[in-house]
Amino acid sequence: MPVSKSSSSHHAPVVEHLLWLRVENVARQYGFVLLVLLLLAGFCGLFSKGVLSNGAAVNADGTLHADYERFGRSQSDMDLKLTMQVPPGESYTVTLGGQFMDTFEINALYPQPWRFSSQNGSMTLEFHDQPEGGTHTLWLSVQPRSAGKVKTALRVNQLPPVTITQFVYP
């Protein structure tokens, strides 16, 4: 059967640009490595809980030690543990200052303070001590309200503060 000239069409060859072929080749070569590196960073805690996220800080005279998470995500729980040396027979106060009150919402706090107050963007928690004094621990579970870099100043009584820096991802 004869083929009519009207039913056949003429196709132009595909024009290949060398630049885009090179870009595709580089993306294929290094994209997998980048993906694996991002997964490993996530597993290690670069984006939330994990080895890279665990932080610790001590104030100048060693009376306050803070264990915290360097990296967190907005609307996800983050833990903060404060260990402090308290003189015997006294009540003591813990002040959470800096950007803490503007950025975090406290979900859990143990032990419960006897009294608390808020002033000038800082929260002060007052605790009654057992007569023997010594080492006391305060556990907080907080939830960031917004993303960004957060600096928090933590202080026991009027002793030197410990400053921690955290980064919250959206």
Image: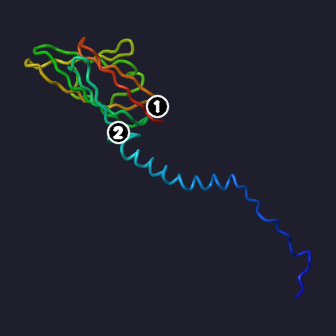
Q: Is residue 108 visible?
A: no
Helix, strand or loop status at disc 1:
loop
For image coordinates 92% across by 77% down, the residue present is 5
Q: Do residues under tags 1 and 2 come within 8 Å of each other at their CB atoms? A: no
Measuring from the top left, give residue 71's x and y in whole percent.
Answer: 39, 35
Question: Looking at numbered disc 1 in the image, what kind of residue is underneath it?
Answer: Ala
Which quadrant, please, contains the N terminus? bottom right
Q: Is residue 95 left or right of residue 86?
A: right
Q: Quadrant of residue 145?
A: top left
Measuring from the top left, give residue 19's x and y in whole percent.
Answer: 69, 52
Helix, strand or loop status at disc 2:
loop
Q: Is residue 38 left or right of residue 156?
A: right
Measuring from the top left, give residue 69's x and y in whole percent.
Answer: 33, 34
Question: Looking at numbered disc 2 in the image, what kind of residue is underneath it?
Answer: Leu
Q: How is the image coloured?
A: rainbow
For image coordinates 37% across by 28% down, the residue present is 105
Measuring from the top left, give residue 39's x and y in whole percent.
Answer: 43, 49
Q: Is residue 62 visible?
A: yes
The residue identified by callout 1 is: 147
* Residue 55: image tag: none
CA separation, marks 1 and 2? 19 Å
Q: Is residue 13 left or right of residue 64?
A: right
* Vertical position of residue 4 compared to residue 24: above or below: below
Residue found farthest to the right = 5
For image coordinates 44% across by 48% down, the residue present is 37
The residue identified by callout 2 is: 52
* Eye-nearest disc, 1 or 2: 2
For image coordinates 46% across by 31% down, the residue present is 147
